[in-house]
Image (cartoon, helix red, strand yellow):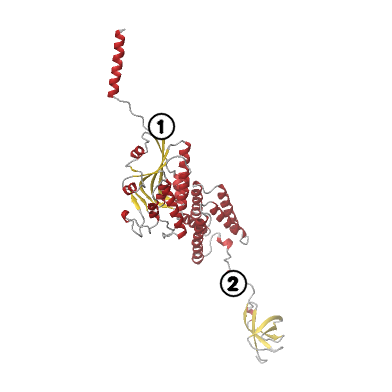
Amino acid sequence: MKSVRISIYSIFLLTAFLLLLFPPAAQSDGEGKLVYYIPVEQTVERGLLAFMERSFEAAAEEGADHIVLEVDTPGGFVDAAGRIASLMNNTDIPITAFVVNEALSAGAYISLIADNIVMMPGTDMGSAAVIDGAGNAAEEKSQSVWLARMQDAAEKNDRDPKYALAMADNSIALPEYRAGEGELLTFNAREALEAGYAEAIANNREELLEFLELEGAIEREMEVSFAEQIARIVTHPIVVPILLSVGSLGLVLELYSPGFGIPGLMGIGALLLYFFGHTVAGFAGWETYILFGIGIVLVVIEILVPGFGIFGILGIGAIVASLVLGSYSTANIMVSILIAAVVTIVAVILLFKYAGYRGPMKRVILSDSTNTEKGYISNVTRNELLGVTGEALTVLRPSGTALIEDERLDVVSEGGYIEQGRKVKVISTAGSRIVVREVSDNG
């Protein structure tokens, strides 16, 4: 019995000694939790919104415990930023904006919506003024709405709103942060931390997870698919009018060439690219393709079987309706259609002027003329009557009737008055026009 007790004590002492030498690893707070990384890169537009909607849905379905937005954007469009903010506000998953390069304009607004902001050293956040498509300051109404949004975003997480307003309004002077009057505020990482606009500075994801107390968490990284990359390009408001212009120009040029060639492929390809991008982005459905197809068929019918323009008008109307139905903004697409129409009209005018009417265009435009050179003769010219004399059957004032070689003919005098019964001689003929001159009895 004594030997048994000694053995137990020995095992206990050995175990205690081993535990002192090799203590068990402490369980991480993030053990078993899931973190989703979502890149917010390039321009903030509707294509990015579609990608983020898919990413948030995937994170929710997989039960993610935290979402990290890796922000690197120069900004973008206010409407897209507003919808992304709504998406972020409507999720129950905590969100951290991790600024990895720059979060400017709409990127700063999205970052402020997040629950936390963590910045890498050397990064920037701010400069969030609203500008129009020409690069000028937007109208006062738009500025007012944007300032209200920036203020609300700052106050959402108890940040001092004056800094958010200074990012969007250059009349607010903060010289201590290099933002005098007439300049927009842009924070670097240290300044953002100092002003309470960043909760931490982290060099990498590992330090970020340590700050979030999620060390050891399972990490998932969302990637933009190839289709989404195309959608982000073709849904850009600057690219849309280019696509529509190429599409309309390609189809017009195809009307000048026999068969179906490169211009037609370019035109249809550009339009299909427009619809594909907007479908991936979630704006266009099958109904837009059906409507577009109906429009193309009607235009082709108008070209092959002219119908006083009815089929053409209906076809163009269907095509325009499909473009509007598949767009994210009626105002933007109407401006794009107007630009494409102007470009196409100018091109058509130049083609008509320098290239004439060729290809299928001959079916819809009357270009042939009936002239003598092509063998068309409306009236036979009676050249055999030249120099022949006859008698005026009626008074010629200056037109009337004359008997020439036993044939009653409508004639016209050379210009003077000729009495009935006088002798006349044919001096010229041109089609149905026969000109006579009075002659004396002795010739």
Would residue 17 be found to the left or right of residue 97 on screen?
left
Q: Nearer the viewer, residue 313 or 433?
A: 313
Q: Position of residue 188 (x, y in %)?
A: 33, 49
- Asked which secondary structure carries label 1, the reply is loop
Q: Nearer the viewer, residue 24 or 217?
A: 24
Determine if residue 429 is in view: yes
Q: Earlier in the sequence, mark 2 or mark 1?
A: 1
Measuring 49% from the left and 51% from the top, which residue is drawn there?
Answer: 274
Vertical comparison of 357 with 117: above or below: below
Would residue 337 be found to the left or right of residue 126 on screen?
right
Q: Which residue carries the number 2 mark?
A: 372
Residue farthest along the top direction in this orientation: 1
Give the quarter of the image for residue 131. Answer: bottom left
- Viewer-side label of 2, 1: 1
Measuring 49% from the left and 60% from the top, which residue is drawn there?
Answer: 339
Residue 32 tag number = 1
Determine if residue 257 is in view: no
- Asked which secondary structure carries label 2, the reply is helix
Vertical comparison of 84 with 331: above or below: above
Q: Position of residue 128 (x, y in %)?
A: 40, 54
Q: Amino acid at mark 1?
A: Gly
